[in-house]
Amino acid sequence: MADDCFGHPRLAAIYDPLDPDRSDLDSYLLMAEEFGARRVLDIGCGTGVFALLLADRGIEVVGVDPALPSIDVARAKPGSERVRWICGDATDLPQLQVDLATMTANVAQAIADPQTWQQTLRGAYEALRPGGHLAFETRDPARRAWEEWTRENSHRVTEIPGVGSVESWVQLIEVTRALVTFRWTYVFAADGQVLTSDSTLRFRERDEIETDLVAHGYVVEDVRDAPDRPGREFVFLARRP
């Protein structure tokens, strides 16, 4: 079940202009180059920003996401015909043999259900060719990122062409052990509509993730720092032998 910020048509349509800086994807583009990837599976592709960046480089891409409105936004973008879009998740993919599978941004943490997480790791493994890599990031729980998720830190008003002014902010709802729930609120000036989107992220420890990867047959090759959040995130690189 996709969060409303991805699954509600009106919110999916403004997702990109509300978050225009995607320099966090630069390190993933470099990884695709590092591994010589010609085929990539983008798990949780959302509105297709990363998938289309890959396609621009001549890479064959499969983008999968459970939120149809986000997939619809991706399909409407220039060059989208070069990407194979699938509405679904990594637990039930067609037969693939990719060089690299990715979960960028919050995708790995948004798979909060333990069973779905295990199924996702298994699905990604099955989609990789022998020697292929899985790359994803997750925040270090010790840094307690959620303490900064306040209205004061996040409130902004964004002018979006064809939409008008949209006021938005985030607030923390609940922290229960490894699960952190927060709510984004959006106010559309054009008609006064107020929409909210609740999300829950799972903050997994580094050793927990490494154990899960090894259990599914991966070799953990590296755990890197995230260039856009130094000292705050783990970037996992795992290989299918």
Image: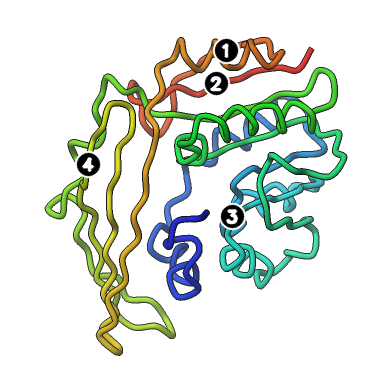
CA gap between label 2 and label 1 equals 6 Å
The amino acid on which the numbered mark 4 sits, given as a three-letter code, is Glu
Q: Nearer the viewer, mark 4 or mark 1?
A: 4
Residue tagged 2: 236
Q: Of the numbered discs in the image, which one, if any, rests on residue 49?
A: 3
Describe the element under mark 3 as helix, strand or loop.
helix
Label number found at residue 174: 4
Q: Earlier in the sequence, mark 3 or mark 2?
A: 3
C-alpha distance separating marks 4 and 1? 32 Å
* Lateral position of residue 5 relative to residue 45, left or right: left
Earlier along the polypeptide chain: callout 4 or callout 1?
A: 4
Residue at the extreme front of the image, as rendered: 115
Q: Label 1 sits on what residue type?
A: Asp
Judge from the rendering whether residue 176 lies leftward or rightward of residue 132; answer left or right. Answer: left
Instruction: Say which amino acid is labelled 3.
Output: Val
Marks 3 and 1 sit apart, C-alpha to C-alpha, by 25 Å
User: Disc 3 and disc 2: Cα gap in Å?
Assistant: 21 Å
Q: Where 164 falls versus 131 (above or below)?
A: below
- Residue 231 relative to residue 214: left or right: left
- Nearest-to-viewer mark from 4 and 3: 4
Task: List the residue tagged with mark 1.
Answer: 222
Label 2 or label 4, whichever lies nearer to me, is: 4
Question: Is tag 4's residue or tag 3's residue first in the polypeptide sequence?
Answer: 3
> For the residue labelled by badge 1, is the local secondary structure a helix, a strand or a loop?
strand
Q: Does 182 sit above or below residue 137? A: below
N-term-proximal mark, 3 vs 1: 3
Within 10 Å of disc 3 (Cα), the crowding (few <14, some 14-19, many 20+) is some
Cβ atoms at labels 2 and 4 below 8 Å apart: no
